[in-house]
Image: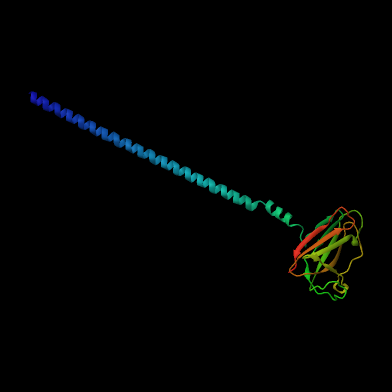
């Protein structure tokens, strides 16, 4: 009887130990699965944050590029920095707005009365508008020019339509005529236009390069 009881006791203890081992293994497995799930969750969160940051940076870059492309202020500043242009109206004074066309090469009918030996000649159309309240004498519109490092020589050629006009421009009216200069090809050409009655003004200069 004692032997049988001892065997039963031993079997019971063995079963308890086996059950304990099974429970412990299950708990360890569950803990590992929890840790793996936590790691996966953390990795997913980090990946989501990284993707979100990347999207934010891309969006910010696109907005910056869009702002730069659509902002006209840079173009306006660039245009202002380049100065007045041939072919565009120029406010020379309170009484005068002048538009001078781009220089075009031409051949004068005669060069006998020129002091310099010029191989290239250019002409420009001039449009003067009286923006004041009083009549404006045409001789008040004065132009002078440089070509490269020397003064360009004005050409007066009646047959080519180049002559100093003598007229009175009434308020709100315009006057058209042409001017010409002997220049050096390949050099900068700077033409300054002034209102002779505006002693406080230094004039307005238009610049280009004669090809």
Q: Residue at x 52, y 47 (%)?
A: 55
Q: Nearer the viewer, residue 62 or 106?
A: 106
Q: Position of residue 111 (x, y in %)?
A: 85, 75
Q: Residue at x 26, y 35 (%)?
A: 25
Rendered-image quadrant of the C terminus: bottom right
Q: Quadrant of residue 82?
A: bottom right
In the image, taking residue 30 as reference, residue 166 lies left or right, namely right
Residue 96 visible in the picture? yes
Residue 85: give x, y in percent of width and height: 76, 60
**Percent x, y for residue 75?**
69, 54
Instruction: Tell which residue pokes out farthest to the top in this image.
Output: 2
- Is 14 placed left or right of 72 in the picture? left
Residue 67 locus on image (x, y percent): 63, 50
Residue drawn at (51%, 44%) of the image: 53
Q: Specify the quadrant of the image occupied by residue 177.
A: bottom right
Q: Is residue 72 visible?
A: no
Residue drawn at the location 38% of the way across and 40% of the way down: 39
Q: Nearer the viewer, residue 189 or 21?
A: 189
Q: Which coloring applies here? A: rainbow
Quarter of the image with the N terminus in it? top left
Count of numbered labels shown in the rendering:
0
Instruction: Using the rendered view, name the quadrant where residue 81 is placed.
Output: bottom right
């Amino acid at each position: 009887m004692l032997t049988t009881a001892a065997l039963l006791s031993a079997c019971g203890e063995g079963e308890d130990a086996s059950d304990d081992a099974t429970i412990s293994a299950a708990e360890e497995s569950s803990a590992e699965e929890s840790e793996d799930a936590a790691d996966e969750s953390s990795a997913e969160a980090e990946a989501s944050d990284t993707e979100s940051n990347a999207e934010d940076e891309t969006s910010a870059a696109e907005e910056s590029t869009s702002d730069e492309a659509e902002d006209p202020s840079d173009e306006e500043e660039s245009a202002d920095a380049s100065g007045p242009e041939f072919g565009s109206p120029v406010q020379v004074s309170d009484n005068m707005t002048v538009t001078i066309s781009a220089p075009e090469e031409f051949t004068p009918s005669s060069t006998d009365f020129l002091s310099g030996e010029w191989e290239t000649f250019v002409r420009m159309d001039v449009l003067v508008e009286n923006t004041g309240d009083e009549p404006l004498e045409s001789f008040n519109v004065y132009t002078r020019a440089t070509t490269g490092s020397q003064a360009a020589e004005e050409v007066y050629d009646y047959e080519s339509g180049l002559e100093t006009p003598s007229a009175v421009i009434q308020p709100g009216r315009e006057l058209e005529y042409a001017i010409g200069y002997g220049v050096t090809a390949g050099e900068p050409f700077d033409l300054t236009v002034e209102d002779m009655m505006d002693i406080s003004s230094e004039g307005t200069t238009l610049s280009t390069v004669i090809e």
